[in-house]
């Protein structure tokens, strides 16, 4: 590779680096604006519902489940992409982690010919709905400011995934630029 083509490749990578860095700054500004609006709307909802109506005392920590998940994907050129959203878990993963737990009830019957042991499943057979809308913890008729605040924070989680992907891309481009600069130095020293 000639020195001129090496310099052009470095220039192209630096331009790409600054373009991605600009996108990172725009996403960061969008994230900050969404957070600001979300907290403002939450404060507005607290004001309209009463100071003690929207607090952490309204719900138990046992009621909390994740409504959004992070999924890592590797795309073309080994690009890592983080997606945030509602994803269905594959049944294979659920089956792997699930163990059959049973309790034994002793001396159930009075028949002497039966063993007197009955197995009872520890987990109920009917599935329970675990993913309940968190707004219901604060009542049925919640203010629209609280619903809008929830929407803002959901968007914040999506934007944070996009921002993390862009930051990974910035780090990869930085490493490529450094390696190209060291290649250029070795090429110049060999001439």
Image (tube, helix red, strand yellow):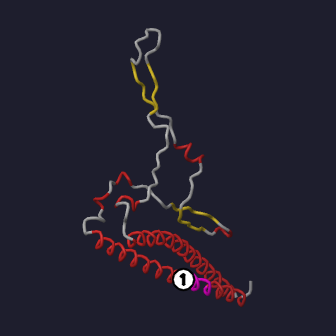
Residue at the spot 47% in from the left edge and 34% down from the top edge = 101
Q: Residue furthest right?
A: 1
Q: Is residue 5 above or below residue 78?
A: below
Residue at the spot 48% in from the left edge and 72% down from the top edge = 155
Q: Is residue 131 above or below residue 51?
A: above
Q: Nearer the viewer, residue 42 or 181?
A: 42
The image quarter containing residue 111 is top left
Q: How many marks?
A: 1
Q: Is residue 130 above or below residue 39?
A: above
Q: Quadrant of the C terminus?
A: bottom right
The image quarter containing residue 38 is bottom left
Q: Which residues are magenta?
A: 14-20
Q: Please tell me whether residue 19 belongs to the stretch shown in magenta.
A: yes
Q: Nearer the viewer, residue 20 or 26?
A: 26
Residue named by callout 1: 21
The image quarter containing residue 42 is bottom left
Q: Please tell me whether residue 104 belongs to the stretch shown in magenta.
A: no
Q: Is residue 190 left or right of residue 156?
A: right
The x and y percentages for residue 54 are 30, 65
């Amino acid at each position: 590779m000639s020195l001129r083509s090496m310099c052009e490749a470095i220039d192209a990578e630096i331009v790409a680096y600054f373009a991605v860095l600009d996108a990172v700054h725009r996403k960061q500004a969008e994230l900050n604006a969404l957070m600001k609006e979300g907290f403002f709307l939450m404060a507005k909802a607290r004001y309209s519902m009463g100071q003690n109506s929207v607090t952490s005392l309204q719900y138990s920590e046992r009621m909390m489940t994740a409504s959004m998940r992070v999924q890592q994907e590797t795309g073309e050129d080994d690009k890592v992409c983080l997606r945030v959203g509602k994803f269905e878990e594959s049944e294979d993963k659920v089956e792997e982690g699930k163990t059959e737990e049973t309790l034994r009830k002793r001396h159930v019957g009075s028949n002497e010919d039966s063993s007197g042991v009955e197995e009872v499943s520890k987990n109920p057979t009917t599935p329970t709905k675990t993913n309940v809308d968190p707004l219901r913890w604060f009542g049925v008729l919640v203010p629209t400011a609280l619903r809008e605040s929830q929407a803002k924070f959901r968007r914040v989680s999506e934007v944070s995934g996009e921002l993390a992907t862009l930051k990974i891309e910035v780090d990869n481009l930085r490493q490529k630029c450094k390696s190209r600069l060291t290649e250029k130095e070795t090429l110049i020293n060999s001439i």
